[in-house]
Structure formats: C-alpha cells, structure tokens
Amino acid sequence: MAGEFELIGRHFTWPVPAGVLGVGDDCALLPVSPGHRLAVTTDLLIEGRHFFADADPESLGHKALAVNVSDLGAMGARPLGCVLGLSLPQADDIWLEKFARGFRALAEAVGCPLVGGDTTRSVNGVVISVTAMGEVPIDAALTRSAAQDGDDIWVTGTLGGAHVALQLLQGHHGEHLGLLETLRPLLERPLPPVRFGASLAGLAHAAIDISDGLLQDLGHIVKASNCAADIEYPLLPVLPALDGLDASIVQPALLSGGDVYQLCFTAAPVARSRIEALACEHSVRVTRVGRIRTGVGINVLASPLPLSSDGCAGFDHFA
C-alpha cells in the first residue's frame, strides 16, 4: 500500500506558475503584485453534511475548489493558489485519482494552482478543507459593506437548480425525478464566474457569492451596508428546466436555495453598459433583479406566494 508522501507525489504534485513555490516544502510561496492585497478564504466539506457518502469523487474534487474560488470572485480577487487538507478513512488510490482529476481540472480552468496542503487518516468519513488565495487591487475589493442607495442589484447565472436537485436526491418531489439528470451537475459541479468577478473590482460596489440562498446572502449585504433592498421576483433568472413546476417548489428554490455559487452584486446604474459588456466578454449571464434603497430589510415584489416570517432564511449549519 502506498504511503502518505507517495500518494501526495502521485496525485497532488502538479506544475505551478513561475515565481511560485508549491508542494514539497514547509510552506508555499506566492508573489503578490505591487498595489494589491491578499484575499484568503477557507471552506470545509464534510461527508454526510455537505455531500453524500457515495458522491462521485471527480465531482467532489471539482466542488471542493469551486466553493472557495467562488468566494474569491465575490471579492473581486484574481486567484493565486490554494492548499488542500484531506482526511480519509483509507487511502483509496482509485478514489484519489478521480478526486484529483476533478480538482485539477477546475484549478487549471480558473488559474488557481494547488501549492500545498496536508493529508491524514479520518475515523469518521471524508473531510475536505480548502484554503484559496487571491489578489485584489488596494481599495477595489468588493466588500459586503459597500452597497449604495440607488444601486442596481445583479445576479449572475440562474437560480433554483441546485436546490431542486438536492431535494430530489433527498427523496422529495418524486413526480419530477426525471429532472435529476439535468439538475444534478448544478449541485455537484457548480461553475462560479471567478474571472468575471475579478473584472468587477473597482466597478461594482458590494458583492457576495450565493451559497446559502439569495435572500440570506443579499441580507448580509444590506445589513453590512445599513440599507434595504427591493427584489423584483418576476426578474429572477429561473433555470429553464424548472419551467412548469409548481410555485411551491420554485419560489423557495429561487429565494432560499443554496449551493448556487453565482454572484449577487450591486453597482451604480451608470455602470450597466460596462457590466453587460464584461459579462459578454466572459460569457456570463447577468440579470438586474432589483435595487438598493434606504431603510431596513429586503422586500420581494410580485412573488406568486406569500413569504413566510422566515422567508429570508437560507442554509444555516446551526439553525
């Protein structure tokens, strides 16, 4: 059986850009451009909490990195590199090969090379920790606290698909099980618009990635920015595959469904044409869904069903 360092050498020692010191030393070394700050984010994925025990390892490798680079995009940061912590019940060479393939493919696609990490044995399932690092120009980061009165609210991509996929996997809505093949990739292989997010630095005002639901995540922006928001429900970018489903399924998927890993951001109306041009350049769909105003909270206009008292509730680990 291969040892720890042989497994690392076989599956996780990849080429890195010039000027970067990667896997194989006590620390990674990453250069940061003059006039920039380092952006750092960490996420955990735990078997039984974030993914099923029989999850496809290649998809899991992809998602483990995707949820981190999504945060970099939300800050307007360009990826520099990442480190991977992996705890496994056993050293399964086939599983590791597939996991590494999915992780590496996304790392190369978004320019976020693996530069280090750690492996250990787990006594209770798979645990994955990824820390991603990027750089953003000083004073250009897209923080949650920078939304301004009158800003447009934008959303990238579409909403709802990942949430409905999860519900189908959990045994709900069995009459729509035929949708699972279409929706499952949105849950297991999200494609956050990282490069587009970086292009918004200095142009947009506030941003967040939609990981726990649109209303909950937008709620973080309005709270941090001491403002309020109006959302036009008919403008929300619904995944076409959800057309025809009952509003009782679609509405919570759009407003509270997590695992989206698209961006919600605010920008002045004068930036509309520039944002649309950047979206076209990066092949990203963008939709204006509302506006920032003075006040408190989020108002959803023209929703097909009344919102419950917890209508802004998204995912919360400890709720």
Image (tube, rainbow, N blue to C red):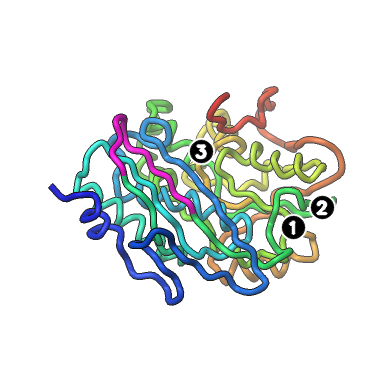
- The quadrant the C terminus occupies is top right
Q: Which label was assigned to residue 205?
A: 1
Percent position (x, y) of residue 235?
Answer: 67, 47
Which of these two is toward me, 269 or 30? 30
Q: Which mark is residue 244?
A: 3
Question: Residue visible at 23% across and 47% down?
Answer: 95
Residue type, mark 3 in image:
Gly
Q: How crowded is mark 1: few (under 14 residues within 10 Å), some or many (20 or more)?
A: many
Question: At label 1, which amino acid type do we have?
Answer: His
For marks 3 and 1, the one nearer the N-term is 1
Front residue of this view, candidates 315 and 111: 111
Extent of the magenta region: 120-131
* Residue that badge 2 annotates: 148
Instruction: For marks 3 and 2, give the CA distance.
Output: 36 Å
Q: In this view, does 222 lie to the left or right of 31?
A: right
Q: Is the Cβ of the residue at disc 3 closer than 8 Å to that at disc 2?
A: no
Kindly state the secondary structure of the residue where label 3 is placed: loop
Q: Crowding at label 3, few (<14), some or many (≥20) Cα neighbours within 10 Å?
A: few
Q: Quadrant of residue 128?
A: top left
- Which SS class for mark 1? loop
Whichever of callouts 2 and 1 sits on the residue coming sooner in the sequence is 2
